[in-house]
Amino acid sequence: MDKAPRYMKEYASSIKKSAEAYKKRFNHENDDPWNETIESAEKIVKNYERGLITDREAMRMLTELSY
Protein backbone atom coordinates (compact mmCIF):
# COMPACT_ATOMS: atom_id res chain seq x y z
CA MET A 1 0.00 0.00 0.00
CA ASP A 2 1.25 3.41 -0.97
CA LYS A 3 0.68 6.51 1.05
CA ALA A 4 -1.20 9.18 -0.85
CA PRO A 5 0.85 12.33 -1.52
CA ARG A 6 0.01 15.41 0.46
CA TYR A 7 -1.25 17.37 -2.56
CA MET A 8 -3.68 14.60 -3.42
CA LYS A 9 -5.08 14.44 0.13
CA GLU A 10 -5.37 18.22 0.31
CA TYR A 11 -7.12 18.44 -3.05
CA ALA A 12 -9.59 15.72 -2.03
CA SER A 13 -10.14 17.54 1.26
CA SER A 14 -10.81 20.77 -0.62
CA ILE A 15 -13.39 19.02 -2.77
CA LYS A 16 -15.12 17.62 0.31
CA LYS A 17 -15.19 21.03 2.01
CA SER A 18 -16.69 22.64 -1.08
CA ALA A 19 -19.37 19.96 -1.29
CA GLU A 20 -20.23 20.50 2.39
CA ALA A 21 -20.49 24.25 1.77
CA TYR A 22 -22.86 23.69 -1.15
CA LYS A 23 -25.00 21.42 1.01
CA LYS A 24 -25.33 24.23 3.57
CA ARG A 25 -25.89 26.87 0.88
CA PHE A 26 -28.84 24.98 -0.56
CA ASN A 27 -30.27 24.25 2.92
CA HIS A 28 -29.81 20.49 2.52
CA GLU A 29 -32.68 20.30 0.03
CA ASN A 30 -30.98 17.68 -2.12
CA ASP A 31 -27.78 16.33 -0.59
CA ASP A 32 -27.41 13.28 -2.87
CA PRO A 33 -25.11 14.84 -5.51
CA TRP A 34 -22.87 16.37 -2.85
CA ASN A 35 -22.73 13.16 -0.82
CA GLU A 36 -21.75 11.28 -3.98
CA THR A 37 -18.97 13.79 -4.62
CA ILE A 38 -17.62 13.36 -1.10
CA GLU A 39 -17.75 9.56 -1.32
CA SER A 40 -16.10 9.57 -4.74
CA ALA A 41 -13.21 11.73 -3.53
CA GLU A 42 -12.63 9.37 -0.61
CA LYS A 43 -12.78 6.30 -2.87
CA ILE A 44 -10.29 7.75 -5.33
CA VAL A 45 -7.70 8.37 -2.61
CA LYS A 46 -8.29 4.89 -1.15
CA ASN A 47 -7.91 3.27 -4.57
CA TYR A 48 -4.60 5.07 -5.04
CA GLU A 49 -3.39 3.91 -1.63
CA ARG A 50 -4.32 0.32 -2.50
CA GLY A 51 -2.37 0.57 -5.73
CA LEU A 52 -5.35 0.15 -8.02
CA ILE A 53 -4.77 3.42 -9.88
CA THR A 54 -1.75 5.60 -10.59
CA ASP A 55 -1.03 9.10 -9.37
CA ARG A 56 -2.02 10.66 -12.70
CA GLU A 57 -5.25 8.70 -12.88
CA ALA A 58 -6.20 9.68 -9.33
CA MET A 59 -5.60 13.36 -9.95
CA ARG A 60 -7.46 13.24 -13.26
CA MET A 61 -10.43 11.59 -11.56
CA LEU A 62 -10.41 14.15 -8.75
CA THR A 63 -10.40 17.04 -11.24
CA GLU A 64 -13.41 15.55 -13.04
CA LEU A 65 -15.58 15.61 -9.91
CA SER A 66 -18.20 18.30 -9.86
CA TYR A 67 -18.08 20.53 -6.82
Image (cartoon, helix red, strand yellow):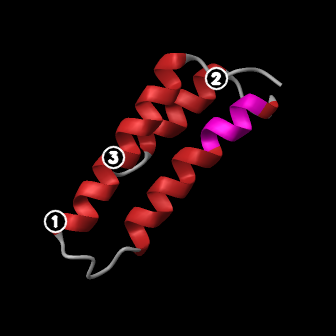
On whether residue 39 falls in the magenta region, the answer is: no
Q: Residues within 10 Å of mark 1 (few under 14, many from 20)?
A: few
Q: Position of residue 14 (x, y in %)?
A: 35, 37
Secondary structure state at the residue bearing disc 1 = helix
Amino acid type at mark 3:
Lys
Furthest-left residue in view? 25
In this figure, which residue is indicated by the disc labeled 2?
A: 4
Amino acid type at mark 2:
Ala
In this figure, which residue is indicated by the disc labeled 1?
A: 25
The answer to whether residue 3 is left or right of residue 10 is right
For the point 38% across and 63% down, the residue is 34
For the point 40% across and 47% down, the residue is 16
The answer to whether residue 52 is left or right of residue 29 is right
In this figure, which residue is indicated by the disc labeled 3?
A: 17
Residue 30 in which image quadrant:
bottom left
Label 1 to label 3: alpha-carbon separation: 12 Å
Label 2 to label 3: alpha-carbon separation: 19 Å
Magenta span covers which residues? 44-49
Label 2 to label 1: alpha-carbon separation: 30 Å
Q: Main secondary structure of the magenta part?
A: helix
Secondary structure state at the residue bearing disc 3 = helix
Is the residue 21 above or below the residue 11 in the image? below
Q: Residues within 10 Å of mark 3 (few under 14, many from 20)?
A: some
